[in-house]
Amino acid sequence: MSTTKLRTSEKVIFGVGDFGANYSWTFIASFIIIYMTDVVGIAGSVIGTIILFCRFADGFSDVFMGSIIDNTNSKMGKAKPWVFWTAPVLGILTFMLFNVPDFLSYTGKIAYIFIVYFLISVIFYTANNVAYSSLVSFMTKDEKDRVALGSIRFIFSNLSVLCITTFTIYFVTNFGDNQQGWTYTSAIYGLLCAIPLMITGYFVKERNVAEKQYREVKKTQRIPFSLIIKSLITEKYFLITIVLYLLWYLKQTDNSMRIYYATYIFNDANVMAIMSIATLLPTILGLLVAPQFAEKVGIKNSIIIGLILSIISYIMMGIFSENLILLVIGLIIHGIGLVPFTAALSGIVADVGDIIYWKTGVPVQGSIFSLASAGMKIGSGLQSAIVGWSLSIGGYVAGASVQSEGTIFAIKSMQIYFPLLAVAIVTIITLFLNYEKFIKHIKAQIRTNNVGEMRDKQIYK
């Protein structure tokens, strides 16, 4: 297996893909509820329920998509064709989601939203994102390169998130401040989604495709799905990683609630841009040095340090929830705290995939990223549903200039208190992530194809 160091240009081309993906994922996650409630007129609880249902279905489709990738053998590679060909469809569907036909009845609008969101979440975003995430395993086995890929990926990801959260309301307002504003904005974002992903899917190179240990399985045959699942669920580090993914994305109610916090706590929707910049700019800058920091103190230790900073920041924001200056300082600290976990996440999944391949001889790169993606999708679905439900329970009135005390409490809870609880739990679970002490030995054995029954079982029992 190749240990060739990746060129910076290829790392950048890889990172560009996540820049594009967020023009679907983050755009939808951040603005679907406010668009559907305030423009289309659908209750937040209805939208939250649709999102939750689709994300749970999405979790199952992720599992099958990983198996499909593991069994794909095309001229482009295993993951690349899925990244490339699903990108334009994802861009079109994102445009369609923010253009609900006005002539439809209330029930018809709900059906339209469900169908389009289902196609995005369960089919096309799943195929694209699982394949894109799997590229980390297929591009390199070098641990430093994997951390670097994770850092560069999330630099581009956070750049696009920063652009989306800063400029979306500006675009919508200046393009018409009604459905027309959302139409033009979603058209631009659809293109910004499709083109970067197609660039990544076409230009990156797969060079680390695991050989099948089971020689009796011919190339034309599929690895049994049951064998892949058994290999995954019997590994404790896989289970830890899935829970971390689920909780990390569940805690992101603060991202979905940011527009409401700016509008109803500070009475200015444009404050959302300030909050986003305060969070994301430190994260982007921090990701530039994240690989060096992780190498110096260790991946797990760097994550713990960052999570403790995040906990401190949420406590600070809870105390000064209506003081914009102190809230912004808290968000800056939080943005710094996000860096180590964000940078390491993809590399952790790839490392756990190596551990499983070494122990069993079953290549699971696609499947492990698909199940990690399932954790992400279910976590994100739950957080979106919780946001929608909390607004409905709090008595949110779409378009009202002043909201009830119940709504204000719901907004603060989803922005500060709930994420604080989730990050605290993530910190505790991360303490059990102890594979760094033997992962280099495992990778050395994989390079000589000493996997499955041929492995040195004393390395990690």
Image (tube, helix red, strand yellow):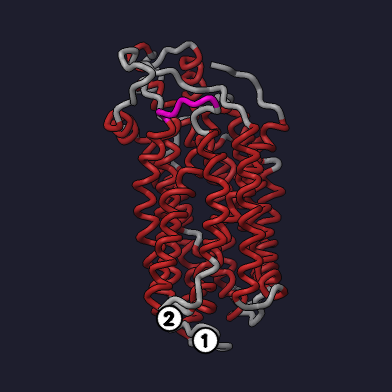
- The disc label shown at residue 422, or none: none
Three-letter amino acid code at the position of disc 2: Gly
Residue behind mark 2: 394
- The location of residue 159, given as percent across then percent down, is 68, 52
Q: Which sits in the foreground, 363 or 291? A: 363
Residue behind mark 1: 403
Q: CA distance from mark 2 to mark 1?
A: 9 Å
Q: Is the residue marked by circle 2 packed among few (<14), some (14-19), or many (20+) residues within 10 Å? A: some
- Residue 73: within the magenta? yes
**Highlighted range, magenta:** 70-75
Main SS of the magenta part reads: loop
| Residues tagged 2 and 1 counted as in contact (Cβ below 8 A) | yes
- Residue 142: within the magenta? no
Q: Is the residue marked by circle 1 packed among few (<14), some (14-19), or many (20+) residues within 10 Å? A: some
Single out the residue that lies furthest toward the front.
103
Q: Residue at x 52, y 57 (%)?
A: 93
- The location of residue 203, given as percent across then percent down, is 65, 32
* Picture quarter with the C terminus: top left
| Image-based side of 362 in relation to 140, left or right | left
Asked which quadrant contains residue 381, the reply is bottom left
Q: Residue at x 58, y 49 (%)?
A: 21
Q: Secondary structure at mark 1?
A: loop
Three-letter amino acid code at the position of disc 1: Gln
- The location of residue 136, given as percent across then percent down, is 55, 33
